[in-house]
Amino acid sequence: MRTRGPDQVQFWLIALVIGALAGVAAIGFREGIALLQRTVYGETDEMLHSHLSTLPWYWVLGIPVVGGFVVGLILWRFTPDGRGRSVAHAIEGAALGHGRVEQEAGLASAAASLITLSTGGSTGREGPVVHLASLISSAVSNWLRAPDITARDLMGCAVAGAVSASFNAPIAGALFALEVILRHFAIHAFAPIVVASVSATVVSRMWSGNVPEFTQPVSTLAFYVEIPAFMVLGLVCGLVAVVMMRAIFLAEDAGDWIAKRLNLWLPLRPAFAGLLLGMIATQFPHIIGVGYETTTKALNGHLLLWTAIIFAVVKVVAVAITMAGRMGGGVFSPSLMLGALTGLAFGWIATSIFPSVSGSQALYALAGMGAVAAAVLGAPISTTLIVFEMTGDWQAGIAVMVAVSLASAVAVKFVDRSFFLTQLERSGRHVAAGPQDYVLCTITVGSLMRPRGAENGASDTQSWALVEQGAFLTRGDTLESALPMFDQISGGMIPVVQPTGDDSPPELLGAVFHVEALKAYNRALAQIAEEEHS
């Protein structure tokens, strides 16, 4: 396998193993959070928010500060930029990283997220589990010396297993990997991803049983009459999702500005965020941790209108603080909670206006949960299926599907398709627009350069003339820089130089020609098209 690559049967067996390992990773991450929460708070997430009201205020205030400082130390020591890795980095690894993610920073991020979610951070556990699964697939790909296509498929297998084990939803897990990580539905990837998803689900059910992540009372839908209400709910949820994403990005920018102005030592940033979270938690303990207790209450209609609205607003603030403080964690669980609270509040209003034709408030909470999560994740298909699989209610699923579709349509007008793709866009990774944009970043000038003095190379006279005009590239530049430069100059080549680091002229290495750059670009697009349609 390491010399010739795995055949189809071997690949499916590898997918089976990777799925099982991803399931174990998801279970281990969840149990690790529960163990730490019992240690520091005396209760796990299922009843944590109720339990916090019995603890002294200084305990609720202090634990997030200590946890944030420990997280800061981990990220400061083991990541080059002090940032935790998440789903966005798995997407980047699939598109730009040859189907792999960085190992040391990824493991550090998993540890940081585990501590964050155990000590007061207001994020989710599914994002870190997805990235942890991509670490497993990257290790296997490196061991197999797998080519890029195989490595991407293995990453899809691992992510499918992580999502399936997290939600006990094998269908949604498989489609999430295709829809969000690989961003295509190639037939060659479908079978092994399904194998991995089922494998992880079996592991999860062997550990915790075949039980849904959330339970909800059975409700009926006044089908034709209530559909318009769910359409309006979808529009509202799309706007709520945009507010949460924009709040996170605004808080991150503000955090960067403050840290720069104060010359803040990196570990102190998450510690200060923990202090703010602790202050909020003394009054609103529902922001602590993953928040499944509050989400379950919303889905069962056990919160009043104004309680749901206030909880939703405070949750957005807490998530923004956690993410801006670089404390680790994901946005999946927060979007589920925010959606359930939004849907419940909308349901209270809708059922009070039309009591004779409306279903239960809990049904609106379910639809809202799916709608906000789909808009944030950019995953309308898999999110809808997650709700189907968690409830088993296909009639309610129709209401969810209506709300999800409109929420997703609204959100894409304000962000780059999803929270994760917007994160990448903000960091200069143009993955959202598709391979016609991001593939340019994968082809370096050095790989196409004709060396100086070559028989078919550029003349020194022409090259130095362009260098004097400021039209030159370095070996590490990519076609993202080269192709726009070709449009600005009249010639068919650009010189490639090596800066000397002082006032002397750079060293001339060779030149890259426009024709060869376009040929390389076309070859890369053809390979991607072949992969996506195979």
Image (cartoon, rainbow, N blue to C red):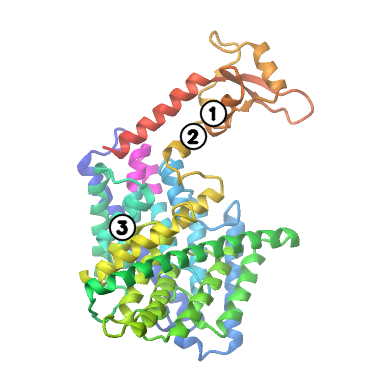
Q: Name the image quarter holding the C terminus.
A: top left
Q: Amino acid at mark 3?
A: Ile
In the rendered structure, which disc, 3 or 2, sits on the residue that comes first in sequence? 3
Q: In the image, is 402 to the left or to the right of 472?
A: left
Q: Which residues are the magenta region? A: 137-154
Q: Nearer the viewer, residue 57 or 375?
A: 375
Please report contact status of discs 2 and 1: CB closer than 8 Å, yes or no.
yes
* Percent x, y of residue 321: 58, 69
Q: In the image, is 191 to the left or to the right of 267?
A: left
Q: Which residue is mark 3?
A: 381
* Percent x, y of residue 444: 52, 30
Q: CA distance from mark 3 to mark 1?
A: 36 Å
- Seen from this angle, which residue lies furthest bottom? 54
Q: CA distance from mark 3 to mark 2?
A: 29 Å
Q: Nearer the viewer, residue 226 or 172?
A: 226
Q: Which residue is mark 2?
A: 440
Q: Which residue is mark 1?
A: 483
Among the 4 quarters of the image, the one containing residue 1? top left
- The mark closer to the camera, 2 or 1, is 1
Indicate the secondary structure of the residue bearing disc 1: helix
